Image (tube, rainbow, N blue to C red):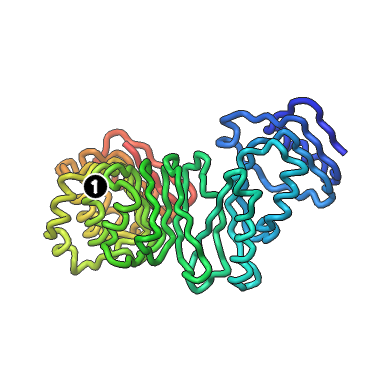
Amino acid sequence: SLIINGRFPFKSLNNVLCCLPKLRHLSINALIHCRDYFEIQELFPIKLKYLKYIFFHNVQILHLTTKYDEEYLNAKRWEDLIVSYKPYLCVFDINHQNSILNNNLIYHDSIKQFDSSFWIKKNWFFTHQHDWTKHLDIGIFYSTDPYRRKDYGFHWEIDEENCSHFQEINLNSVQHVSIYSRQITNIYLNYFPNVTQLTIKHYFQTSDDSIITTLNHMIPLVQLKKLTIGSYNFPFEEIIKLLRFTPNLYALKLNLLSMKETNLQLIEQNENFQYVSKTNKIKHLDLRECCTLNQIQLIVKLFSQLEYLKTCMNRKEIGQITKYLLSRNNNKTQHLFFLCISETSKICLKELNVLIKSENLLNHYFIKFINRDLYLWW
């Protein structure tokens, strides 16, 4: 048994538990934490298979993120635990992802238990989303009040028969929204007024409006600073169209450029391309695919303010692309000072070094190879 009657720092708890693998009883009177600790310290899970009793009598705030274990959806057990061992708890913030025996009815029956008078009296309300309409036994169950949560995952695959929708409030703290849905219905949209980062996981379908209109119903696109598109089938023309409505973007990350070599000239002549090339402020570009010289030339024409570029290249084209980017006659790359060539071989470090010196491309520069990525800055 371990009983701590005084104040105990949270940053020391992990070390103590590591030294007590057979601990059966733990009681801490006051658990104190440093505000910056959670941001700088990564805690690894500890298995305490002998632990039978733990008591945090004065806990007022509980934030819990968990997966898979369906016992976390046992509302009656939570109620007994809070009444008996956490009488001063005022914030109960849960985010739980789970499936229950491939049975969507059992899943919905479980989460409905959190609608009892106990939870309502404490003003603790919850809702849920689904990853995919074909697997409604899999859900994301969470507190509707995000308690200053900065990140929000938007799924909203709805089963009209079993899912009741609770319109969430107090989303002002959310700064980063990740959209996982493959289809979005406007009647289930929440609005996030202070979002500055957006991640789109899939090329989603909308009920009536365009993707841009739907996104504008969710977030103010004009204030976005960072955009990540993780989809492999998001058309490049649609990306350019989206960039037209996000003029204050600073950073852009794309998994795949869905454009064919034969269409590059047509893309460049497009009205949206011409408009975005003159108005965008993107300085940081991260591309998760191999780009050809022609594609790089198009990208540079589109993003003339680039300072940082990360992309994959075919080894045979690294020399040509580097010469193009570092050319003193290329006013489209005048702001560029950092290049990362990802997923390349170490021999490219020597080859690129020789090229820069023999062609006198740069007077002062640094070059390094780290974990299959080649970094060049000047």
Along the viewing direction, whichever of 276 and 80 lies nearer the viewer: 80
181 lies above or below 306:
below
SS state under label 1: helix
Q: Residue at x 54, y 70 (%)?
A: 136
Left/right placement of residue 106 relative to residue 21 reads left
Along the viewing direction, whichever of 274 and 299 lies nearer the viewer: 274
Amino acid type of the residue tagged 1 in the rendering: Leu
Q: Residue 93's x, y, as percent?
A: 59, 45
- How many marks on residues? 1
Q: Residue 161's x, y, as percent?
A: 50, 71
Residue found at the far right of this picture: 1
282 lies above or below 188:
above
The answer to whether one can see residue 311 in this image is no
Q: Residue at x 74, y 44 (%)?
A: 83
Q: Residue 240's x, y, as percent?
A: 23, 56
Badge 1: residue crowd in 10 Å (few <14, some 14–19, many ≥20): many
Left/right placement of residue 200 relative to residue 148 reads left
Residue found at the far top of this picture: 6
Residue named by callout 1 = 325
The image quadrant where one finds the N terminus is top right
Q: Residue at x 15, y 58 (%)?
A: 268
The image quadrant where one finds the C terminus is top left
Along the viewing direction, whichever of 352 and 56 lies nearer the viewer: 56
Q: Residue at x 58, y 30 (%)?
A: 35
The answer to whether one can see residue 56 in this image is yes
Q: Residue 244's x, y, as percent?
A: 21, 51
Left/right placement of residue 104 relative to residue 255 reads right
